[in-house]
């Protein structure tokens, strides 16, 4: 499409967004005012539009631009200095004299000189705006082309010829690009490479402190991602794991509940005997950004000075049940239980001023009957009133409306609890009870739950359909569901109001009351009418896929589970200043967690694939703690809910936390529910030094949002209260500034509880390693080494001219021809072939003669490799770098500690080696391709670098933090160095080098590397993995080798290998107990699992690795890294080492079972995916295998594809590569079996009965499977 020429007044080279090299570009002009953010900042005579740009990797950005049109060239000429006005005045005078003479112009003297002078002046003339009308200006061109015509043409052309000479092309008007801003961007990770785990830290304006000491840095999984200009690092982490957002931490004891109101943190205390311990009040002192935040306890006597209502006694002896701010942040509403005998529940309204708190009103809550308060909903505030709900042990609910003047109004919703215990024992009687079990109050638009209305446009479109789209009777019988849905639901967005508009575009909001009953009924009421529900559906708490009022079939009830909704919460999720959606979260008495999205007048369940029930291991650990009397004698396991005890809410809505709205679920595994581009995502929360699960079922027992963390009140944070390591009951209160950079433009939420933050570097990152040395890396400045490559253009203009004349070139050519003839004669006389003799002296000059008439030698692109030393605390900036040679490629890198042995191998003193200290080195393996290309075999080098850190005084003076120093280099003639690893045996650390087909064991001593052992493989060494003194060697064309190192004679011996010719891309190691498994990934995107089993018949006497299982992965990877599989007892910890130590101190037998000693493998794929493979015990495997077989037949698959056929092993097409045996299978498809958690309870019971198991046992297996698969 041809567009008018545009001039940009923006600075050249300005970078917008985080894209790499732009590969696609699309312009979308806009004619309306949809982009008000652009329109408001630009002049009136402007047009706006959007630009879509995308890179080769998949990154894309949406930019908004503004064009100002009809800008006269006068404005541009003034900037460059136009001709003086005297020339124009002189020209006008001459023209006037010629006109007054009365003769034709061509008959005047000097006519042609005058005409040339006018043409020259017209070239720089300025068009008068008043001499043409608006219509003529629109029709006139912006650029007048040169023309010799003197008359004729349209009116606009005549007008143009009257004022401007048409002998040369002239620029009249321009269109300028005034502004361009980034509206949105989508980050693509690209290929993920081998990474490491290390600390990350950054400056957030605050310092995190605990007990006067600065916190240790948080850690993350760091992976290379992308390539080229879109390359960088990917930080894989989770909320709570990164300490960059932690402000302050304090230890607590025996806290039962926590609420944040008016800058105060209220803590409801309890004793070991469940006695009322009163309320403690903390205040967060916010200072400047240079100072730290502190938490201090406030004296209640000094804070509350009120003798009329005796509020001090209530706070000292009462039990805190709920607290909230009212419409004004100065007023506080607190609900206390003063005594359990008289069932007295006191609602107090206090006003905060500079002197403290003053009681305004005090009310007594009761139902008029002997009944206990079981649950309190969140408080909803309006301009003139506050509403909250409560559930009582009689089975009814009471909604309280508190007016601003202190008066209270009650609304009762009827419900009946089970009067006979036998009713709860029988499933049929249980689901006939209408007891209210959960309540929630929220605000939404007026017509949110009204029936969708079909617009007239959709009706006209339906009437205009052709007859061929109408179904006949047979099709209607076959596709009855589809036909009914197509007729009932309107097309596109013609259903009235959408769910995302209820807060963003609707100013009028109503207060809604939602209740869930024991029989699974969900009812919604609109205040103040609490008798007639506006919405009612069945299946709440039972996992129904859709809850709608138009349910035609009766909902099936669970047969073996008495399940009901224990807590419900409606919440909004999305950007605080953007579109948001309404969701419903449900927590059952079994611990199941369901989430529904409100859309089109119904609730549709969202698949989270997260089992949230308490695990069997937690219950077993709890029983052990009680037997050892580490728990109070009257402690109650919270997994067994007492229906007569007060229930503290698990769900908490949050607003504007890091610019997002959502929900925090304090379940057995705490979750954050947020949205990414209108898609709900669950993020797993991690707590620092959290106690092992089992002491209490909830690791996070308190959460508060809206904490003021700045003096101005502009910043809002949150705080958590979790069980910490130590004696049972110890807790830690943590105040956060936000949840890190989770919602930045370069953030990605792939699912599975993870978050990925991309650090763009503009280069291809091949390897990244953390320098784990306290003398080099500190908490403030963690240092990493990164092996990168970048594309550079090499100038070849020197080849255009060699500096010789034609005669000299001819003379050199003749001399070479004579030498060639002489060698040919010698070859004929000697009887040998000249081509074999002189093959390395190929004359390349004749092949690359450059014809300068065609433009000369163009620049060529080459890869330049470098080693960078980066500082994670300083936005990953480069501290120091080392450039590799030309034609040298960096292939591998490893940070190792080598033992210095100052004895020559083979000498007489080698028997008693002088073993020195370990030295930390950054080792780099390279491959050198000669300038002549592949005509000469490639070689390699091993480079040893030492990182030297500067002292504090030098750094303060402006010196760099550290520098790379090359200590030693060794030439490797076998081939390029493709792998480096460290072998640790008998207190000695040596370097293992894989180059070509050789494996060399190098020893560091006397400032050099000396070979002490070797092994020769078949083709090309790809990678080497160590455990103890064993090697797993992967050959790029010949599968796996299993080797052993003997220290006595310093030899590497082959124990077994796989004899199938498999092109290996990656190899890994996994284990369960004493059983080791070798994982192999090949070119057909398969995973194969081998074991060394000399006693097996298939091992051929122990010389062959036995294949145990295989699966088709469907993605390509280049790295399989091992990691420790954590159970459900340790999964909530951000510091698993400290939690594991605490668990072993509580249970001395932990770690002896095989399931407690498991190593899995994780890997990133070439398409940006991240996966894990974990080992299972036999009983769990066969149970999940049976479940996989049932689900593969029962569940709908994508595009009607068979998941079992997709996971079958793909054989290699190489000759001799077909395996003689059948496919082993033996691998569970985790993506398939985890869908069992999202099924309704009745379907779960059916599938469990089909395989002869129970729902509890299957979900517990899936829970351990999910916990073990989480790397962080």
Image (cartoon, rainbow, N blue to C red):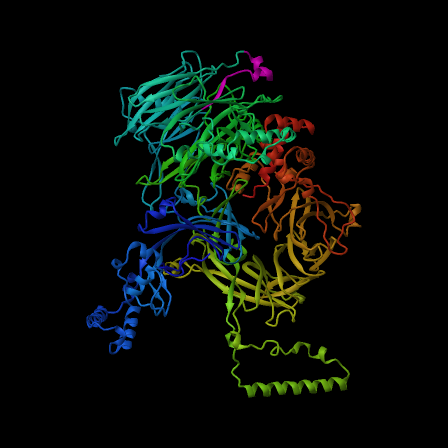
Could you say where residue 106 lies in the image, as x and y percent from the top left? 27, 75
| Residue 425 painted magenta | yes
Q: Which of 166 and 89 is in front in this view?
A: 166
Residue 978 visible in the shown view: yes
Left-right relation of 251 to 833: left
Q: How many labels does the image show?
A: 0
Horizontal placement of 377 versus 127: left or right? right
Closer-to-camera residue (651/827): 827
Residue at 53% in and 29% down: 488
Q: Which residue lies furthest to the front in this view?
A: 103
Relative to 1125, is 1218 on the left or the right? Answer: right
- Identify whether 99 is placed above or below 1176: below
The image position of residue 521, as x and y in percent, is: 52, 21
Tell me the quadrant of the picture where the C terminus can be found: top right
Q: In which quarter of the image is residue 1129?
A: top right
Say which residue appears at 54% left-offset and 30% top-offset: 487
Q: Which quadrant of the structure image shows residue 1024?
A: bottom right
Q: Is residue 617 visible?
A: no
x%, y% of residue 1110? Answer: 70, 45
In the displayed structure image, the side of residue 312 where residue 888 appears, left or right: right
Is 701 situated above or below 1003? above
Is residue 1138 magenta-colored? no
| Residue 355 point in image, percent of width and height | 25, 30
The segment highlighted magenta reads: 420-439
């Amino acid at each position: 499409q041809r567009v008018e020429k545009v001039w940009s007044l923006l600075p050249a080279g300005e970078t917008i967004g985080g894209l790499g090299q732009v590969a696609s570009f699309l312009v979308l002009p806009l004619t309306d005012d949809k982009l008000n953010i652009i329109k408001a900042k630009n002049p009136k005579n402007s047009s706006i539009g959007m630009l879509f740009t995308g890179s080769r990797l998949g990154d894309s950005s949406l930019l908004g631009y503004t064009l100002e049109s009809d800008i006269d060239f006068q404005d541009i000429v003034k900037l460059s200095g136009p001709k003086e006005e005297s020339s124009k005045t002189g020209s006008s005078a001459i023209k006037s004299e010629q006109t007054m003479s009365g003769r034709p112009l061509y008959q005047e003297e000097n006519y042609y000189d005058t005409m040339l002078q006018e043409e020259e002046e017209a070239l720089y003339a300025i068009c008068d705006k008043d001499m043409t009308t608006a219509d003529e200006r629109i029709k006139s061109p912006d650029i007048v082309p040169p023309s010799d015509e003197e008359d004729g043409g349209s009116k606009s052309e005549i007008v143009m010829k009257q004022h401007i000479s048409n002998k040369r092309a002239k620029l009249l008007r321009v269109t300028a690009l005034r502004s361009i801003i980034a509206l949105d961007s989508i980050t693509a990770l690209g290929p993920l490479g081998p990474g490491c785990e290390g600390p990350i830290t950054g400056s957030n304006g605050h310092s995190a402190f605990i007990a006067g000491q600065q916190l240790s840095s948080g850690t993350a999984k760091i992976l290379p991602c992308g390539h080229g200009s879109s390359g960088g690092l990917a930080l894989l982490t989770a909320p709570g794991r990164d300490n960059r957002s932690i402000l302050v931490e304090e230890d607590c004891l025996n806290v039962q509940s926590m609420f944040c109101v008016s800058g105060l943190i209220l803590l409801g205390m309890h004793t070991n005997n469940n006695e009322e311990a009163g309320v403690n009040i903390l205040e967060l002192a916010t200072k400047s950004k240079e100072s730290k935040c502190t938490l201090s306890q406030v004296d209640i006597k000094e804070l509350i000075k009120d003798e009329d209502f005796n509020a001090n006694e209530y706070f000292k002896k009462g039990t805190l049940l709920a607290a909230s701010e009212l419409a004004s942040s100065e007023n506080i509403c607190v609900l206390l239980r003063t005594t359990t005998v008289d069932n007295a529940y006191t609602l107090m309204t206090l006003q905060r001023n500079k002197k403290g708190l003053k009681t305004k009103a005090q009310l007594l809550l009761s139902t008029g009957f002997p009944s206990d308060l079981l649950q309190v909903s969140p408080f909803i505030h309006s301009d003139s009133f506050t509403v909250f709900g409560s559930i009582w042990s009689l089975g009814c609910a009471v909604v309280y409306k508190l007016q601003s003047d202190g008066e209270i109004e009650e609304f009762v919703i009827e419900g009946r609890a089970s009067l006979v215990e036998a009713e709860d024992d029988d499933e049929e009687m249980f689901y006939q009870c209408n007891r209210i079990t959960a309540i929630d109050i929220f605000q939404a638009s007026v017509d949110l739950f009204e029936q969708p209305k079909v617009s007239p446009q959709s009706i006209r479109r339906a009437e205009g359909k052709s007859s061929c789209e109408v179904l006949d009777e047979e099709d209607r019988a076959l596709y009855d569901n589809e036909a009914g849905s197509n007729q009932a639901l309107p097309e596109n967005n013609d259903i009235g109001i959408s769910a995302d508009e209820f807060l963003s575009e609707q100013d009028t909001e109503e207060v809604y009351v939602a209740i869930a009953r024991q029989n699974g009924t969900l009812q919604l009421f609109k205040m103040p009418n609490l008798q007639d529900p506006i919405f009612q559906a069945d299946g709440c708490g039972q996992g129904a896929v859709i809850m709608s009022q138009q349910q035609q079939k009766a909902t099936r009830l669970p047969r073996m589970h008495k399940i009901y909704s224990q807590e419900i919460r409606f919440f909004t999720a999305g950007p605080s200043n953007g579109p948001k959606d309404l969701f419903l979260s449900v927590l059952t008495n079994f611990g199941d967690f369901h989430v529904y999205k409100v859309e089109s007048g119904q609730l549709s369940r969202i698949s989270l694939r997260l089992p949230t029930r308490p695990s069997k291991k937690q219950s077993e650990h709890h029983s052990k703690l009680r037997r050892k009397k580490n728990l109070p004698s009257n402690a109650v396991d919270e997994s067994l809910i007492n229906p007569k005890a007060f229930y503290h809410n698990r769900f908490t809505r949050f607003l504007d936390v890091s610019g997002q709205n959502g929900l925090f679920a304090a379940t057995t595994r705490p979750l954050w529910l947020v949205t990414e581009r209108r898609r709900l995502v669950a993020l797993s929360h991690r707590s620092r030094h959290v106690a092992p699960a089992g002491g209490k079922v909830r690791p996070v027992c308190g959460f508060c949002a809206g904490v003021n963390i700045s003096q101005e009140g502009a910043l809002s944070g949150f705080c958590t209260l979790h069980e910490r390591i130590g004696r049972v009951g110890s807790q830690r209160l943590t105040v956060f500034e936000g949840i890190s950079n989770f919602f930045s433009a370069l953030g990605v939420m792939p699912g599975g509880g993870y978050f990925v933050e991309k650090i763009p570097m503009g280069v291809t990152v091949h390897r990244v390693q953390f320098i784990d040395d306290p003398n080099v890396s500190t908490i403030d400045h963690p240092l990493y080494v990164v092996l990168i490559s970048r594309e550079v253009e090499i100038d070849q203009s020197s080849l255009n001219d060699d500096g010789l004349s034609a005669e000299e070139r001819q003379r050199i050519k003749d001399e070479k021809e004579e030498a060639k003839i002489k060698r040919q004669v010698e070859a004929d006389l000697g009887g040998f072939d000249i081509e074999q003799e002189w093959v390395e002296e190929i004359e390349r000059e004749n092949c690359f003669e450059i014809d300068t008439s065609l433009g000369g030698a163009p620049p060529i692109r080459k890869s330049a490799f470098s080693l960078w030393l980066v500082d994670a605390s300083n936005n990953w900036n480069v501290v120091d770098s080392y450039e590799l040679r030309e034609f040298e490629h960096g292939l591998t890198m490893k940070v190792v500690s080598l033992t210095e042995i100052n004895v020559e191998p083979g000498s007489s003193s080698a028997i008693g080696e002088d073993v020195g200290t370990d030295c930390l080195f950054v080792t780099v393996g390279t491959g050198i391709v000669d300038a002549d290309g592949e005509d000469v075999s490639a070689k390699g080098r091993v480079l040893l670098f030492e990182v030297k850190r500067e002292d504090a005084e030098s750094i303060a003076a402006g010196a760099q933090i550290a520098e790379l120093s090359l200590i030693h280099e060794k030439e490797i003639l076998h081939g390029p160095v493709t792998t480096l690893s460290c072998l640790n045996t008998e207190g000695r650390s040596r370097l293992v080098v894989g180059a070509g087909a050789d494996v060399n064991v190098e020893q560091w001593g006397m400032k050099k590397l000396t070979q002490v052992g070797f092994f020769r493989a078949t083709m090309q060494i790809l990678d080497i993995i160590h455990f103890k003194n064993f090697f797993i060697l992967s050959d790029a064309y010949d599968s796996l080798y299993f080797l052993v190192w003997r220290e006595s004679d310093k030899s590497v011996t082959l124990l077994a290998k796989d004899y199938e010719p498999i092109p290996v891309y990656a190899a890994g190691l996994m284990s369960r107990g004493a059983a080791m498994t070798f994982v192999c990934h090949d070119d057909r995107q398969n995973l194969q699992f081998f074991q060394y089993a000399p006693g097996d018949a298939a091992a051929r006497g122990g010389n062959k690795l036995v294949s145990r299982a295989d699966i088709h992965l469907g993605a390509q990877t280049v790295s399989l890294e091992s990691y420790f599989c954590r159970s459900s007892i340790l999964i909530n910890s951000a510091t698993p080492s400290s939690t594991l130590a605490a668990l072993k101190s509580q249970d001395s037998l932990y770690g002896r079972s095989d399931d407690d000693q498991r190593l899995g493998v994780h890997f990133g794929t070439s398409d940006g995916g991240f996966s894990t493979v974990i080992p299972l015990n036999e009983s769990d495997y066969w149970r999940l295998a049976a479940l996989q077989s049932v689900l593969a037949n029962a569940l709908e698959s994508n595009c009607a594809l068979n998941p079992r056929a997709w996971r079958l092993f793909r054989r290699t097409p190489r000759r001799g590569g077909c395996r003689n045996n059948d496919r082993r299978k033996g691998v569970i498809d985790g993506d398939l079996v985890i869908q069992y958690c999202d099924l309704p309870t009745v379907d779960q019971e059916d599938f469990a009965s089909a395989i002869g198991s129970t729902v509890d046992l299957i979900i517990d297996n899936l829970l351990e499977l999910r916990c073990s698969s989480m790397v962080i």
